[in-house]
Amino acid sequence: PPGPAAGLAPADGKKLAIEKFADGAITCLKFSGTIDEQFSGKAVAATVKPGTLILDLADVTKISSFGIREWVDFMNQVGQKVEQLFLIELAPKIVDQLNMVANFAGKGRVVSFYAPYRCDYCDDDRRRLLQFETDYEAIKNMKPPVRPCEACGNPEYFDEDPTSFFSFLAQQQQFELDPTVATFLSAKMNYAVAEGRKIKIEKQIEGRATYVKLIGDLDGSFPRDKLAEGLEGDVIFDLTSVGKIDPAGAAEWRLLMAVIRAATDRIFLVGCPPVFIERLTQEEDLGGKAQVLSFAMPYTCSKCATTASQVVDVEQHFDVLKFATPPELKCLDCNGDTACAASDALLAHLATLPKPAPDPQVRKFIKAAQERKPEKPKVATDVAMAQSRSQTLMMALVGLAALIVISIAAVAIVKMGKEGPTTEDYLDPKKSKIVEVSTDKPPAWVDKTVERAGGNVLFVGRSSYVAERQAGFDEAENAAIENIAQQISTMLVRNGKWLDHVQPQFRQHRDQAMGALERLATSERPDPAQLEAAKKAVREGRRRVASTFKRTAASLLPAQKSDYYWQKFSTTAGVRYRVAVLYSLPNPVFEKMVETYSGSGGEMGVSVVTFFPSLGWRYELEDGAIVTNLKPDSAMRLVGIAPGDIITAVDDIPIKDANGFQKTVQVRYQIACKDGADMVWKAKRGDGPIVDMRARIPAGCGQVAKRPPRVYQPGPGGYTPPVKAPSKGGRNIWEENIRE
């Protein structure tokens, strides 16, 4: 993150630091340290531009009496300049000031805050983030929720007097966070927001061009089929306001692209967020038709220290982007020089973007569509009329069904925790009802997939409808662990070799399995046999992924889940259970997981990484080492080993991971060198069987410097020397270095 903003930190620069982040009309100021008399509230307020202001007060350690005076002046000044003011992740000391100092929050509204909790079993105090939106009832009633301890699993209790701690917050009126603000916080600042924001779609049509703007989080509820219907000609997707993207949402987007590819002439993507660029603009995602016109990247100004999201035009800067280099841009606020603050993964991906070729008419239409304000009242009326017509039609269909007495399978999609099923069930949903739950109120996390909260990463897994509760727990736990693997894979894409040789081996298989289940589960009359087969494929894929994870990184997985929630249904098919489980991983543990699967080993000119859990979507294997690179003169290259091969054993010694590969090959090579012997590597390539790759190691090779082993090849001579390393002439070394 950038350092203290120029002109915003006090003279000594030690007690208080203020970081500034911006995106269009939204500005976020992050305060860290002590607020005292050196904090010049009016001076800081003068640097704030109109629009929306967000204040992050999580790292404020102390606020003095004179600091309070300056703070109130600051809040009064900014309150007159901005339209919206939000306070997020307030430290407990700030909550104390809210309760004691009049006008401390000004016209600001509190979105989230930290509450003090304690675990007596661990003898440890910690802070827990509460969201005003999801925890509103607990705050209003001054009854803070009990939380399970992440270390021991026992209940933590609220370590304050709730009446005094919640005295200010309990009086704040409930409100819904503006979607653009929620998107900024979750997608661009990685803050926790109350809940996922369902995609809102705005569409404009002119001639044979259709402009589609998506607002919200891209998840499994993405209305792919409805959106795809009727799209033709030129289609422009404005992704500026897309927030988080979970694996199910990514799969839905890929299916949308596959569905509309044939019917459309051209597909243009504008305003792509960084996470979208990294995950959904690979060559296979674009399919030769979609073109990225622009995307957002963060830049930090060296003059005013503002980190702002800037839009990069791909066609304009293509000559720079093709070398995986960000273009040089000026600060939008002060015109100072900036430095790109994008992730390594995003920068590495820039060179893969194809050069777009939009004509002037397309650009003119995009500009006009972006500047046009939506007709909100008319849209609201149209939506209400559509809903009314839909309800009338539904009532007629239900009546008709009752008259002709037909029995068909149906699908009901609602949030877990509401009345009725969340996945497939049988006809007459009114007879499918909840008869028992684990807790009276569903926990706030139950409809999430992955979320960062404080210093932890939360992973949620949910089961389908199952006849036994334990089976639901097993399925939900596997789903949660599979989500962990997916999140790790998003971190590993910065490794070019991993991206080339590991991810392609499972990505398509996972997307196909998830996509097939989603299509059947949301269709009106799914074939029961096909639906069951799709459910089984997803269930088995997740089971293998979880099993692999436990074999290759068991010490890093929590010993037990952090929380759970289940529902028992009475349906026309009998009793059914739905289970959701929560795993909470401290950030250092999650980072260690990423390190485990990104770390490489190498011997005999062969580089490998540890077998990745998501390969369970394709293979029955549960461990091994995946080849990512071979030196030109490697004996194993001549034997037939190639990047992407999975090494399962060396001389019948099983290989569990990259470290095991390195140690085993070292030992077996030295043994073979004593008298001369064959080394046999068992390798699996693609969907073929595991085969033996055999190399003859000459006697005494370990005592001769740089003497390569001879390679066994069938033929009259029996043995042939290794070929000379090819010259690098004509190879694009620059591109190879980037991929490394």
Image: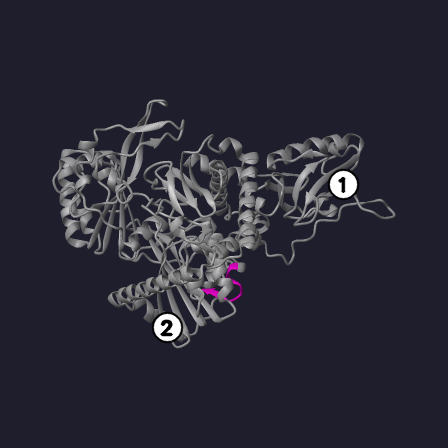
Looking at this view, name the residue that lies furthest to the right.
716
Is 344 one of the magenta-colored residues? no
Q: Locate residue 711: give its quadrant.
A: top right
Q: Residue 268's image quarter?
A: bottom left
Amino acid on which the number 1 mark rests in the picture: Ala
Which quadrant does the N terminus fall into? top left
Q: Which mark is residue 695?
A: 1
Q: Is residue 710 left or right of residue 408?
A: right
Residue at 76% x, 32% y is 673
Counting from the top left corner in percent of width and height, residue 686 is at 65, 50
In this picture, which residue range is highlighted in magenta? 285-292
Residue 451 location in percent, x, y?
39, 43
What amino acid is at disc 2? Ile
Q: Of residues 311 and 615, which is closer to you in this image? A: 615
Between 553 and 120, the one lying in front of the other is 120
Q: Is residue 400 above or below residue 181?
A: below
Tag of residue 340: none
How does the figure colour the protein chain or chains? one colour
x and y, in percent, of residue 590 in the image: 45, 37
Label 1 secondary element: strand
Discs 1/2, front? 2
In the displayed structure, 424 sits above or below 60; it is: below
Q: Which residue is mark 2?
A: 205
Depth check, front residue: 385 or 653: 385
User: In the shown orientation, is residue 190 left or right of residue 67?
Assistant: right
